[in-house]
Amino acid sequence: MRLFTLGLCAATILLGSCSSIARGVTEAIIEEQKNAEDARECEISGRGFDGILQSLETQTPSTPKITKVLMVHGISSHKPGYSNRLQKKLYAHLGLSTTDPVVKTINLDSDTVKWGKDEPHTLGQLRITRHADPTEQRQLLFYELTWSPITDPQKQALEGDSANNDGLKRASLNGSLKSFMNTTVPDLLIYNGNGYDKITASVRQSVCWMMGNIWEDLPESGTHECRAWDGSTFSMIESDDHFFITHSLGSRITIDTIQNFSNSDSTQPLEGPDSAIRRAIYGKEFTVYMMANQLPLLQMGRDAPAHSGMADDYCLPGSPKADQRVMKRMNIVAFSDPNDILSYPVPPDFAAHNIDSRICPDVRNVSLHITTEKNLFDTLSFANPLDAHNGYMEDDRVIEMIARGIRRGSVPPLTGQRCKWIEIKEIVSKNDAREKSR
């Protein structure tokens, strides 16, 4: 009994020591993570830009308008509702605390797609929600596009390899990486192959629904094509504000869709039923916030657009071809983490020579560390590339900049505290430059 009591006391002491050691180690890890998070860097390069809040602030009873946001996802399979966490953070920044209980869900279709015999007309799903401030004076419609159903059937062929039921056992890390490759890389290949027409048609239809209808006229459910819908009036294009939030491959898809619109639009007569739409778009600015974009990578093997490298001819005041541009300006805000292996910044020279000049692209780059960097054996550093690629939609700095933008004299608090801004002045016409130099 004495030995048992001594042993119990010793065990208690050891357990207490282990508990103290474990608690100390845990606290050290937490403190290290906290310090590492504080050390994440952020650098903005380019002109100032507006966020979604500036659009909401211009909504008044005398100037009725709606702020509209289209979300386009990227690689890997997604389910409707994938952007919910991003939306909640965004609405908190925007002061939108009221949500309509109705969620409108449109299964997309288009007669421009060459459907195979007995092939189901599947272009994905558009999920539309309405949000407002407590007074309901400011309203926002959020359009969440899920185009995964287009590529998912082809990707099923690799599910057996991801499961690795028949081959030799994979190391756990290698298995995770192989599964990631099998669920993401095929989307890139399918998009550049037989899925291009359907995926761009999915975005084109989503843009049509965003521009062509007010909330009350949108169908609540069912399969529809935008232009065939009786309520498509396009009467609010000029007054409403339109934003795009894209992730990964979604950025390339969105830019391609807009460029395709530029090509088809240039062949349309100035008269006709679409002329009012064209005139409205001609005078508007649009903004796309790109997270983890792959524009430079997916430009490989492609020819540059026929109308690239000519921004001065189309976009500056008094430009000789200003009447041939498609829109006043396409603001591009590109967020990229250098530790994200599937993300690339968009250098100004790339945009100038690889994006159609008729949409007047204006690029800002935000380089930031999404994940914390860890030291391995005091000689190597490592940041999880998968977390880096998927973490943009929950990063507070990214959400704040999308919500509030950045301007001289109006820098959001977290952005001002955590980011360095290298401002690039706006390009002006040669005549304006001469006048300013006098």
Image (cartoon, grey):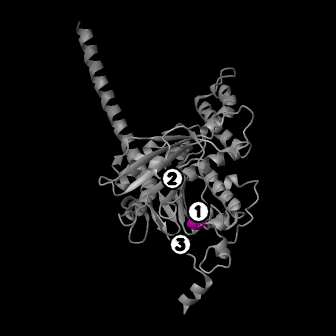
Please state which amino acid type lies under the numbered disc 2. Answer: Asn
Q: Is residue 315 left or right of residue 289?
A: right
Residue depth check, mark 3 versus mark 1: number of the one nearer the observer: 1
Residue occupied by mark 1: 277
Q: Nearer the viewer, residue 304 or 200?
A: 200
Q: CA distance from mark 3 to mark 1?
A: 33 Å
Residue 84, above or below 53: above
Residue occupied by mark 3: 424
Q: Alpha-carbon neighbours of circle 2 within 10 Å: few (<14), some, or many (≥20)?
A: many
Seen at 61% across and 55% down, the residue is 344
Task: Indicate which disc residue 153 carries.
Answer: none
Mark 1 and mark 2 residues within 8 Å of each other at the beta carbon: no
Farthest-out residue, bottom: 438
Give the magenta-colored segment's residue range. Answer: 276-281
Q: Nearer the viewer, residue 292 or 338?
A: 292
Q: Secondary structure at mark 2?
A: loop
Q: CA distance from mark 1 to mark 2?
A: 13 Å
Residue occupied by mark 2: 213
Q: Alpha-carbon neighbours of circle 1 within 10 Å: few (<14), some, or many (≥20)?
A: some
Residue 411 at x, y percent in the picture? 39, 66
